[in-house]
Image (cartoon, rainbow, N blue to C red):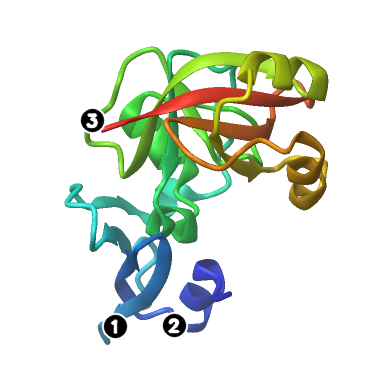
Amino acid sequence: MFDLHEGLRLLPETTRVDILSWKGECREILFHLERDTSGPVKNPRIICTELESGLPDFDFHFRESGDAAVSTGEPKTWLYEPHAAVRKAGAWPPICEHFALEALHPNTHLFTSEKIERDFPGRRFRILDTLPYRPAEILEWMAGRPARMLFYNFPEQSQQVIAQLRIPSGEPLWLFFVTKHDGHPAVIMTEKEG
């Protein structure tokens, strides 16, 4: 549970940070230090790498990630789930700016757009439908089909939702239980791309 901001505060000589993830988990955070008599570096380069995916690295300068607000909006055609290294970096403003994405909610950390971004550092999903969180409507829409269920910033406990809905686990459907930008819980029905 290492915090990147705290690490940079404790190691002010940092010029670069490599964040490495593998199989969906952040595995290493490497701080590159350089002594300089002119004072500490204030804007180190952050490089996020998913070792297994074959996707390009995502890199940005620390100052870009700051406390800038990200724009939020309704789910569009595509849903993006950043890989573990990007999540560890908390690179929400740079990733939104670089790929022209909107966040579903400031604390959900899933993103959306009308066009597909094939170089996005994470998984991409085509949105089939978005429903308010009403179990009867969700079950009617599912019609007994299997799905993978993921929870991001959702007000209900995942175990309770899974027990209540009893949706068989499987693909090709992926259901994202989220809080949208308007504060309402919703379920985004998707299919994984690629």
Q: Position of residue 79 (x, y in %)?
A: 45, 27
The CA span between labels 1 and 3 is 33 Å
**Residue 63 in sight in this render:** yes
* Residue depicted at x 26% and y 83%: 36
What is the number of the mark on residue 118? 3
165 on left or right of 40: right
* Residue depicted at x 31% and y 68%: 20
**Residue 134 in sight in this render:** no
Question: Where, by quadrant of the figure, is residue 45 drawn?
Answer: bottom left
**Which residue in the structure is indicated by mark 2?**
11
184 on left or right of 12: right
* Residue depicted at x 56% and y 26%: 145
**Which residue in the structure is indicated by mark 1?**
33
Q: Is residue 89 above or below residue 10?
A: above
Q: Is residue 193 above or below residue 52?
A: above
As helix, strand or loop, the secondary structure at mark 3 comes to loop
Q: Position of residue 95 (x, y in %)?
A: 39, 39
Mark closer to the chain start, 1 or 3 = 1
Q: Nearer the viewer, residue 26 or 5?
A: 26
The residue carrying pointer 3 sits among few (fewer than 14), some (14 to 19) or many (20 or more) residues within 10 Å by Cα, namely few
Q: Is residue 33 above or below residue 119?
A: below
Q: Are marks 1 and 2 in contact (CB under 8 Å)?
A: yes
**Type of amino acid under label 3:** Arg
